[in-house]
Amino acid sequence: MRYLTKLTLSFSGLLAIALVSAGLAFWSARSAEYHLERSQLAHLVHEQYLALSSHAYQLFKQYGDALLIGDRDRGAGEAALLNEIRADISQLRILIAEEVQLVGDEEIEELELLAQIERQINRVLNEFDRVQARASFADPAEYTAHLADVLDRKIDANFQALILEALAEEKEEVAETEAALRAAIALYERAAVAAGVLAALSAFFGIVLLRRGLTRPLQRLLDGAAAVGRGELAHRIDAPGDTELDQVAQAFNKMIDRVAARQDSLSASRDALEEEVSRRTAQLEKLLQTLRQTEANRKRLLADVSHELRTPLTIIRGEADVALRGGERSTEEYREVLSRTREAADHTARIVDDLLFVARQETGDVRIRPQELDLAELVEHAVEASRTLGGSEKAVIFEASVRPAKLAADPSRIQQVITILLENALRYGGEEVRVRVDQAPGGFAVTVADNGPGLTEEEMNHVFERFFRGSNAALRYDGGAGLGLPVAKAIVEAHGGRIALSSDPGEGVQARFTLPERPRLAAAV
């Protein structure tokens, strides 16, 4: 049951009790007023009957004295008493009429009794007049006997009986009225006590029911608010009914659901933001590392360029100094000096060109000129041209699992890559070099493998760095600048391919690069 209904029923019950109590009090007041008024009227009628009786006996005595001893005041006393008697009777009629109006027709009998008394008084007065008229001619004994009969029978018997009856009725009515009043008062008291007890019980049970119905839901609401205040968003308030507080609890649960969903959304957003920040931080760190590496490469490049160019420039300057010192030289001598100078300049130009190509590839500015070619045929020609590079003792074996191997590439640059790999294999490898062309996903692959001493793991981590030379190259060959593999890597990647070396110490080196059938558009011009 809803609390509004409980409150309405409780207050309606209390209002009904209050209205009943008010009605009872009003009825009690009206009833008490009625009984008091009836009692007062009964007392007044009783007193008026006493007054009538007194005046009547005085009048009768006056008449008797006048008959026995003579009328000394010539009837003045009798006339005054007679007026009082008439006034008493008139007042009694008024009082009895009020009783009839107050009580009902049951009081009409009193009017009849009053009329009998009035007629009896008139009879007595008529008898006194007849007695007085016979006093002049009657026998005194007969006159006295007649007067005694009037006094004894007419007054003492008849009139007194009527007066006593009227007084008895009024006394009985006063007693009944007082008894009814006492009974009404007792009833009023019992009704008041019952109404008070009923009101007290209603209020008590209403308070108990409302307190019991409000305490637990309010405590659940307080506990739920405290739990949410502690951050326990999984807490829900039990709301089994449909009361106002249950509706408040349900609204509270819905609000907590929305808050929890909002917090979950915020947590997810925060996690996503943290992840994005971490990702961006990692990117920035990677970029910073790249920048640091780039700066380090730039510094190393400058140092390497300075170091690598110092030798050919020293040779050029030395040859020039030799040509300029001394006397006249022959044309052959000048030609020999210029030839050595040209070789040093060519070596320097190749170094600069390779460094420029690698730098442009690192910045994405390299350009290639692709055209249709047969990769197998290109590799085969490079192998034929390189068989004389390592000497007659080197065996170069060429194999092709696919012919033709058509693709779009820059022939000169691909030729340069093949030449670099063959030169490294022939100069630093073993006695046998195998070159193979195979089909690869989306293109073709070229593999150059030797059976030389191979490279260590540390050397494998640096083979594509500029000016790096493995221990084998440093021991067995004085030439070279350490730019071959970086240049090869730059050329292959500019075509959209990949290059990798694999090696185990003592088992040779295997270099493999793949090329797509079509180069990347960004690298083509």
Image (cartoon, rainbow, N blue to C red):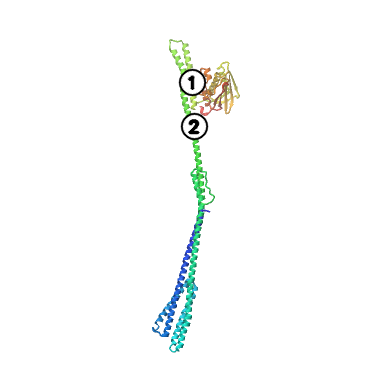
Q: Residues within 10 Å of mark 1 (few under 14, many from 20)?
A: many
- Could you say where residue 207 lies in the image, as x and y percent from the top left? 50, 55
Between 451 and 245, the one nearer to me in the picture: 245
Between 409 and 59, the one nearer to me in the picture: 59
Between 423 and 243, the one nearer to me in the picture: 243
Task: State how many labels appear.
Answer: 2
Q: Is residue 11 above or below residue 137?
A: above
Between 14 and 46, the one nearer to me in the picture: 46
Residue drawn at 48 percent across, 25 percent down:
360
**Res. 16 in view:** no
The amino acid on which the numbered mark 2 sits, given as a three-letter code, is Gln
Badge 2 marks a residue whose secondary structure is: helix
The residue mark sitting in front, 1 or 2, is 2
- Could you say where residue 233 lies in the image, as x and y percent from the top left? 51, 43
**Which comes sooner in the sequence, label 1 or label 2?**
2
Query: Which mark is on residue 61?
Result: none
Residue drawn at 49 percent across, 35 percent down:
276
Q: Residues within 10 Å of mark 2 (few under 14, many from 20)?
A: few
- Could you say where residue 56 lies in the image, as x and y percent from the top left? 44, 79
Q: Quadrant of residue 400?
A: top right
The amino acid on which the numbered mark 1 sits, given as a three-letter code, is Ile
Q: Residue furthest left?
A: 73
**Res. 68 in view:** yes
Q: Residue furthest right?
A: 401
Q: Quadrant of residue 512?
A: top right
Spatial CA distance of label 1 from label 2 is 34 Å
Q: Which residue is mark 1?
A: 351
- Could you say where residue 54 lies in the image, as x and y percent from the top left? 43, 78
Q: Is residue 68 above or below residue 391?
A: below
Badge 1 marks a residue whose secondary structure is: helix
Q: Is residue 264 above or below residue 27?
A: above
Q: Which residue is mark 2?
A: 283
